[in-house]
Amino acid sequence: MIESVTTKQINHFRIQGFVHIPGFLAPNELTTWRHEIDAAVKQQRGGQTLDGSPAGSKEGHYANVFLQQMLLSRISEGVRKLMHEPQLGRIACDLSDIDGIRIWHDQALIKEPLANATAFHRDVPYWSFDSRQAISVWVALDDATLQNGCLYFLPGSQHLTDFVPSGIGENMGELTARYPALADIEPIPVPVTAGDAVYIDGMVAHGAGPNMTTGYRRAMTCAYMPDGATFNGKRNILSESYQSSLSIGDTLDNNDELPLIFSRGIAQS
Ligand SMILES: O=C(O)CCC(=O)C(=O)O
Ligand SMILES: [Fe+2]
């Protein structure tokens, strides 16, 4: 994994709301990530392998956007090790200008052959805390191209919307109906090579194209919460028991559900 990000990459992230980091994983690391994540996805799908059959037969539009395999780090020791790597968190802290970071959730997002596009959306409005410093990492396990569903961004849009959830519907332009200023921003496609990463500001509008190929577009993502963020009352991935113990405004500091993977105050091994 790369050692650090450059000042140019940090500036790009802060202005545009995303940054593409080529060569994020070394080739041997990419092999390990693919192996561990494929195995965990198969396990979570009850042993069902990715057999090349196209998306499109599942009920509803969203079910055919991608296979969304959540919280693989909780079922696979191998994925847990990868996701808890402090270096992932350190880079996120450098980009987002924060001192400590907790995992909000990890998920593999796999666009099957002929999968639908991912409509423009923001991530944070669904989560149980409000923050303009939340960030996630999206690591390409396959090349993500203009043909198979690479990410697209509305650069600079992270400053232009609020925390009201607005849905990931069928229509790419839905977000611009709520936030008309977004309609003036030219979307930027971000095709990447397997092993590259894209760090995504939790408030930037982003989406992905459809998969117009017979292959898969696999990505592994991890979303992060700045350490010290507080509960906003929204239901998302927290367990029923933890959520019911919380009042709005409480600091989210449960180390089992929200592991602190990096903090500048704590010496890293
Ligand atoms: O991979 C995709 O299609 C969308 C990714 C995304 O929205 C995210 O990682 O937050
Ligand atoms: Fe997203």
Image (cartoon, rainbow, N blue to C red):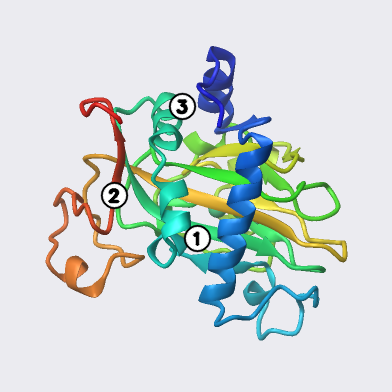
The residue wearing badge 2 is 259
Name above or below for residue 94 compared with residue 241. above
SS state under label 3 = helix
- Amino acid type at image mark 2: Pro
- Note whether ligand 1 is within 8 Å of mark 2: no
Image mark for residue 143 = none
On residue 95, the disc is 3
Residue on which disc 1 sits: 166
135, 173: nearer the viewer: 135
Say which residue appears at 77% left-offset and 46% top-offset: 143
Please tell me whether residue 171 is drawn above or below residue 164 in the rendered image: below
- How many numbered dots are placed on residues in this image? 3
Tag 2's secondary structure?
Answer: loop
Quarter of the figure that contains the N terminus: top right
Q: Is residue 103 rendered to the left or right of residue 160?
A: left
Q: Which residue is drawn at 26% across and 39% down?
A: 227
Q: What residue type is labelled 3?
A: Leu
Q: In the picture shown, does residue 134 fall above or below 142?
A: above
Foreground mark, 1 or 2?
2
Q: Residue sitting at 74 percent across and 48 percent down?
A: 150
